[in-house]
Amino acid sequence: ALRNEMVTRLLLDPSLAVAPVDLKNMCGSLAIPNTENEVIHRVPRMWPLLAPWIREPRQHVYKDDAHTLHHIAASGGLDQGDPVSALLAPLSIVTAHETLSAHAIVLGEVDDTYLLIKPDQAATVLEAVAPAFAPSGTQVNVAKSCIWWPSHVNVGASGFIQVPDIPA
């Protein structure tokens, strides 16, 4: 669905550049206070239900090569693959998406974010990406984040690289 939305937007406005944003270990790096704040302010009626998933330490069991079980308490973030994380992780970065939407079309689904940008605004938008996501506790993985546009585009000091083919 996300890819279809992106293609439709590009067909409607072929002047847009595409910038997929990759976040390093999104679920595991989310700042719990930010996640709490987003839930309390955006879906307050769900807070009593979601608070235990956010606040309570989660226990994991690890079996080593000697078949000894080790109990490990998760110290932060959310568990990737947990059904509740599929709700909480995107909610944790809504403010970042809102911030970026002032100068770009922002398409997001779970941990995938795509920015559709006017090429002459690319440097400004891309340099705003890391600061927009910082309060959520996440870091942009510039090694996997890029921008596509058929001719040269200025990426400023963002660290994004320009790629020759539209990202998949």
Image (cartoon, rainbow, N blue to C red):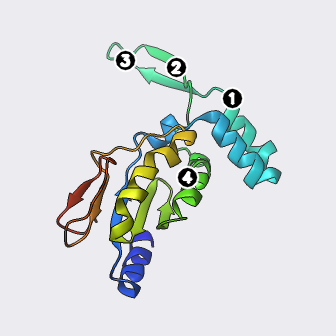
Label 3: how many Cα within 10 Å (few below 14, some 14–19, many 20+)? few
Q: Does residue 80 show up? A: no
Tag 3 secondary structure: loop
The mark that comes first in sequence, 2 or 4, is: 2
Q: CA distance from mark 1 to mark 2?
A: 13 Å
**What is the three-letter code of the residue carrying label 4?**
Ala
The answer to whether one can see residue 53 in this image is yes
Instruction: Pinpoint residue 9: horizontal percent, then vertical percent.
Output: 42, 80
What type is the residue that disc 1 sits on? Glu
Question: Sequence order check: which comes first, mark 2 or mark 3?
Answer: 3
Residue 71 falls left or right of residue 124: right
Q: Which percent across, then down, holds residue 24?
A: 40, 41
Counting residues from the N terminus, which is met first, the one under dot 3 or under dot 4?
A: 3
Residue 42 position, x and y percent, is 73, 54
On residue 72, the disc is: 2
> Decide: marks 1, 4 in contact (CB < 8 A)?
no
Dot 1 or dot 4, earlier in sequence: 1
Total labels drawn: 4
Q: Which mark is residue 96?
A: 4
- Residue under circle 3? 64
In the image, what residue type sits under mark 3? Asp
- Label 1 and label 4: CA atoms lie apart by 25 Å
The image quadrant where one finds the C terminus is bottom left
